[in-house]
Amino acid sequence: MKHSCLRYEWVLLIFFHGILLMSMSSCLKSKSVPALANETDRLALLDFKNQITQDPLQIMNSWNNSVHFCNWIGVTCSPSSKRVTVLDLDAKRLLGTIPPSIGNLTYLTGINLESNSFNGEIPQEVGRLQFLHHLNLSDNSFGGKLPANLSYCTQLRVLDVSYNDLVGQIPDHLSSLSKLVILSLGVNNLTGTIPAWIGNFSSLYVLGLYWNYFQGSIPGGLGRLSRLGFFRLSVNNLSGTIPHQIYNISSIYFFSVAVNQLHGSLPTDVGFTLPNLYSFLGGGNYFTGPIPESFSNAAQLLVLDLPENGLTGTVPQNLANLQDFYWLNLGDNSLGKGKDGDLSFLNFLANSSSLGVLNLDGNNFGGALPSSIANLSTQLQQFTAGENKIHGNIPTGIGNLVNLYVLVLQDNYLGGTLPHDLGKLQNLNELYLNNNTFFGPIPSTLGNLTALTKLYMDGNRFEGRIPASLGNCRNLLLLNLSHNNLSGTIPKQVMGLSTLSIFLDLSYNFLIGALPFEVGKLKQLSKLDLSKNRLSGKIPTTLETCTSLEHLYLDGNSFEGEIPQSLKNLKGLEDIDLSHNKLFGHIPEFLSKLLALKYLDISYNDFEGEVPSEGVFANASAISIFGNEKLCGGVQELHLSSCSSKHPKLYGKLLALRIIIPLTCIIIFVLLLLYFFPTCSILKNQGREP
């Protein structure tokens, strides 16, 4: 929505810019100015050029003495007087500051430096430009305060300094700018209250004060802005209620007060008093009461966005009468009664052929999903109804929503088996089915969702094998199948999904067999959780190529053997849990060299020998080694016996073995010699007898 609003502003700015420039150029044709004044303009422009420190497009190369300054890029002059009337360097990637000499360009009617990297303060000398109609410094890095001297620019129609780093309050001196048509101060760090005198700007059509730190109430005097079309006060610290006078400005088409601290209820007749509405955004406040049915009277309404409030009641069915209705966001309210029929309005929304976004998350909707959702607009891209009290199955026919991009149904009471035609949603990017009561196998048709980046199916009762077809989802960044009843081995096709980067979580299932060597293909993966399964065999050495791993959880399985030395390459590991397995051998020294390691759990295995004292091992609270009876040493807080006294009997036995075994061999050898030597002598003697 932010970008669409900015498009509205941009169209208006271009429109007014053209009109104002034409009017000013005609006014200046009759003026006669001496040549000395022209030299003043040239020097002022050269000073402006000298303040440019970066010019990757080499715009300033044209600003030279070989051509008249009226022919320099971005400069427009009056044909008759040759005085500079417009300085337009929009989106030229310039870096620099505006010099005070800008005030010498006294015939300027328009300045447009939008979308560059200008910084520093806006010079007070801009106030000398008494013919200025259009000032657009938006999307730069200007700091400091709004110059109070702008009050002398009484002909200003457009003042746009949005998307900068301006601070302080709106100067009261600017109350003199009574001819303003566009006032856009959004996305700065402005503070204080909204001045009531803005209500005197009878020609104002665009008021954009969004994304600042304004506080206090919205002045009722703004209700006098009878020509206002664009009203955006979103993302501030405004409190109180919205003055009823503002709801009576029938020309408003864009209304946004989202993300403030406003309260009260929405007027029941809002759709009659604001009949030209295209967008109404009031999310992130404390509004209560029902959604007015009169919104359906605003026949051109495209967007109704009211999330994160305290709205109650039902969703008006007559919203379906809006022919071009595109966006309905009612998430995180208290709508619905937790009963059957709460979602009956969906039967009517099936008539809204343009509906693209439907967000019902975080409410109190009960009952089943009506089968009519299969008849919602094929233009629907987002359908979210998570965190409600919805039960029953996902209706068959959901595959008809072929353009669905996001489907969110998590944290409900949905159950049954998944319909196979979910696999028809080939544009689906995110699928959230977690924390419901689904059972049965995971449909292999999910492998058709090749555009998927996020798949959440955890916290259900899915059973059977993980479909190898999920390996076809080669855009997956995240896969969570944890806390189910899945069995069988992990398909190598899934374990080898090299796109996985956020996490792969298969924990709390009944998976068996070895961890596939294909795990080494997860080179971008940050978190791997295979805990609480029945996996066995050795930890694959191929894990060494998963160099992005930060969290590794293999606990609660039957892995055996030693910790592979190859894991020393995983320099970014922060958490390792190998507890409750059948691992043995010495604790590898490299674990104490992993500088990022913050937590290590190797408890309940069969490790032996000395516990290191460096790295993560230096903090007893950062490691867990319980259930390894043959360990010794380590830091004092572990309360382990020193390795020299821990195993005296074992040491004695080893020493005895080192002595007894060689001695025994010698004795046996001697006995054999004694046995064979007499025998050989007798045989020899017998051989000598005649």
Image: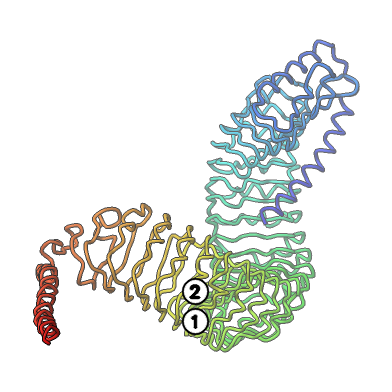
Instruction: Identify the residue at horizontal 69%, vertical 19% (top origin).
Output: 47
Above or below residue 364? Residue 11 is above
Report the side of 670 relative to 490 (left or right).
Answer: left
Q: Position of residue 193 (x, y in %)?
A: 55, 43
Instruction: Identify the residue at horizontal 71%, vertical 49% (top origin).
Output: 6
Read off the residue under disc 2. Answer: 516
Q: Position of residue 384 (x, y in %)?
A: 61, 72
Query: Camera-side residue: 223 or 589?
Result: 589
Query: Mark 2, residues whose alpha carbon is within 10 Å: few (<14), some, or many (≥20)?
Result: some
The quadrant holding residue 662 is: bottom left
Report the side of 224 relative to 680 (left or right).
Answer: right
Report the side of 611 relative to 201 (left or right).
Answer: left
Query: Among all residues in the image, which is located at the extreme front?
Result: 690
Whether residues under marks 1 and 2 lie with C-beta atoms below 8 angstroms apart, the answer is yes
Query: Camera-side residue: 351 or 425?
Result: 425
Whether residue 227 is visible here, answered yes or no, is: yes
Quadrant of the image containing the C terminus: bottom left
Q: Amino acid at mark 1?
A: Thr
Above or below residue 201? Residue 247 is below
Read off the residue under disc 1. Answer: 489
